Image (cartoon, helix red, strand yellow):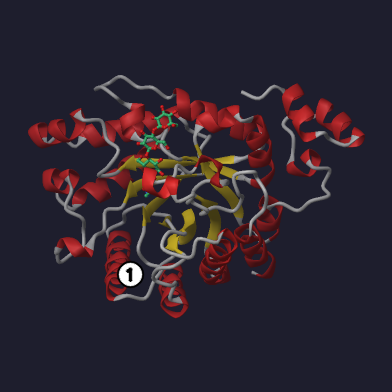
Amino acid sequence: MLSRRTLLKTLSLTPLARATAARAWPLRPSVLDGGARESLRTLAARRGVVFGSAAGSYQLGDSEFAAVLGREAGILVPEYELKRNLIEPSPGHYDFSGCETLVKFARNFGMGVRGHTLVWHASNPAWLPDAVQSRRDSSLMTDYIGTVMARFKNNIHSWDVVNEAIAPGDGRKDGLRNSFWLEAFGPAFIDDAFHAARAADPVAQLVYNDWGCEAGAPDNDRFRAATLSFLEQALARGVPIDALGLQGHLAAFGAKVDQTKLARFLDDVKAIGLRILVTEHDVDDTGGPSAADERDRAVADASRRFLDVVLANRATVAVLSWGLSDRFLHSPGLRQRLSGYSPRMLPLDAELNRKPMWHALAQSFAQA
Ligand code: G3I
C-alpha cells in the first residue's frame, strides 16, 4: 500500500495541492497533478463515461505507477485476482486478499471497481470442473456467486456475471460455447447465473462480457448475430442482464474494426435496452514493422477507429483498457525478446509516457 508521504513525494505536488492533499484524503486527480494536466479520467468523465484499467495488486507496489494509475483511472478491474482459481483455490476456501488490496486502492482514489468474473470456462481451480461434472449441482455456481458478491457488496460498479459463453465456431444452433458449465447444466446455466447475481445484489449492474464483435469478417458477423439473438431471447425470458461488455482486444496489423457493422450492432444492443461497456481494451502490435513509432501509430489508429464508434453510442457508460502501461506486459517469448520486441499495446509506455494511443483515447473522449 502507498503511504501518503510516498505518494506526495512521488508526485512532487505544488504547495497548494500538497496542503490540500495533506488535509483531504482520498486525493482526487485534479489535486494529484494540480489540475494542470487533463487525464483520461477527467476527459472521459466530461463525456459522462468512466475510464479505467485492469490492474494486479503486485503493480501497486510500484509507487510511480500507482500514482499515475490514480490520476488516469476512474475505475479498476482486477486482471486476474477476482477469478475463481485465485478466489476459491480449494472447495469452500476463499482468498480475497489480492482483490481487497485493489478495492482499497480504488477507494483511496475515489475509483469504482468492476467485478471480473463470476462464471467463465477458464481460470477455474482444478477441482471445479470435476465437481460440476460429477455432482451436476448448480449450487456449485450459484453459491459461489452469492458468496463473492456478498463479500464485495456496495463496492462493485458492475459485475461480469458470465464471460465468453458465446462461440458460434463450436457449431451449436444457439451459438453457445461448449464448456463444462453448458455440458453439466445446459444453456440455462447463463440464466441461473444472472438470477443468482440479482438475488445477491438487487442493484448491481449485471454484465454479459465477451469478445469478437469488432471486425468485419464472417466470424464476426456470426458472433454479432449470435450475441444479439442470445441477449434478445434472454431478456424476453426475464433474465436480469443490464449491459453488454465488449472486451475490445484489437489487432494493429490484423483485421480492422468494421465501423459500419460495429455501429449497427451497438445500435441494436442499445435498442433492446442494454448499456454498453468496453471492458478490456488493448491493441496487439505483433506482426507489424519493428519501429516503435510505426507500431504506436497503428495501435492508436486502431483504438481510435473502435472508440469513435463505441462512444458515438449514448448507451456506452465505461471504457477500460486491459492495463494502463506497457511496463507490466511480459514479452511473449525469448525469440521476440532477443529481437528487441516488447509489446506496446497500452496507453502509456513502460516509462509511463503518454503514447499516441493515450492521445487517441483522449481525442475520442473529447470529440464524443
Ligand atoms: O498468480 C501470479 C501472481 O502470484 C504474480 O504476482 C503475478 C505477477 O507476476 O502473476 C500471476 O500470474 C498470472 C497472471 O496472469 C499475471 O498477469 C496468473 O497465474 C495468470 O492466470 C493470469 O492470466 C490472466 C488470464 O486472463 C487468465 O486469468 C491474464 O493476466 C489476463 O490478462 C487474462 O485476461 C483475459 C480476461 O480475463 C478475459 N478476456 C481475455 C483476457 C486475455 O486473455
Q: Residues within 10 Å of mark 1 (few under 14, many from 20)?
A: many
Seen in the image, is 72 located left or right of residue 221? Answer: right
What's the residue type where badge 1 is placed?
Arg
Q: Quadrant of ligand 1?
A: top left
Q: Residue at x 68, y 36 (%)?
A: 67
Where in the figure is residue 242, as x and y percent of width and height? 43, 55
Where in the figure is residue 355, as x and y percent of width and height? 64, 56
Would you place residue 297 above or below residue 122 in this image? below
Q: Assign a secondary structure to mark 1.
A: helix
Q: Which residue of the protein is positioned furthest toward the bottom in this rendering?
A: 260
**Figure disc tally:** 1
Q: Residue at x 44, y 68 (%)?
A: 253
Whether residue 333 is visible here, answered yes or no, is no
Seen in the image, is 160 located left or right of residue 326? Answer: left
Seen in the image, is 144 located left or right of residue 41? Answer: left
Q: Residue at x 24, y 60 (%)?
A: 167
Where in the figure is residue 45, as x and y percent of width and height? 67, 55
Residue 23 placement: quadrant: top right
Q: Residue at x 27, y 71 (%)?
A: 219
Where in the figure is residue 62, as x and y percent of width and height? 61, 30
Would you place residue 303 above or below residue 9 in this image? below
Residue behind mark 1: 224
Q: Which residue of the protein is positioned furthest toward the top in this rendering?
A: 93
Viewer-nearest residue: 323 or 44: 323
Would you place residue 356 above or below residue 271 in this image? above
Viewer-nearest residue: 11 or 161: 11
